Image (spheres, grey):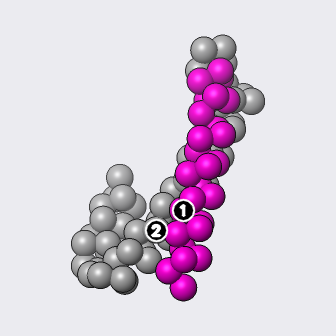
Amino acid sequence: MLHNKKKYDELKAKKGAEFDRAYTEQMVVDHKQTIADFKKESSDGSQASLKAFADGEIPALEHHLMESEKAITAMK
């Protein structure tokens, strides 16, 4: 939780294009972690319904990651 508070405080201090860049970069980091978590649950989970849910969400998460990466490229 402290990690999230620190990131929030860092973003809160930024303005304009600096905020946009930092926010988008954090979105990429967060999506990569979320995808890894969902893949782990999909392959190693103990409940079939959660495994199926995680597996079904991975394509959307990967699409969101791709769009976040495009946004970073567009800002440069």
Q: Which residue is mark 2?
A: 24
The reply to whether callout 1 and callout 2 are in contact (CB within 8 Å) is: yes
Q: Residue at x 64, y 38 (%)?
A: 58
Image quadrant in which you'd find residue 51: top right
Q: Quadrant of the C terminus?
A: bottom right
Circle 1 Cα neighbour tier, 10 Å, few/some/many (<14 / 14–19 / ≥20): many
Amino acid under disc 1: Ser
In the rendered structure, find residue 68 and report the number of the disc placed on it: 1
Percent x, y of residue 20: 38, 74
Q: Which residues are magenta?
A: 51-76
Q: Residue at x 54, y 62 (%)?
A: 68
Amino acid under disc 2: Thr
Q: Residue at x 59, y 66 (%)?
A: 69
Q: Is residue 54 magenta?
A: yes
Mark 1: secondary structure: helix
Percent x, y of residue 59: 66, 40
Q: Is residue 53 magenta?
A: yes
Q: Main secondary structure of the magenta part?
A: helix
Image quadrant in which you'd find residue 3: bottom left
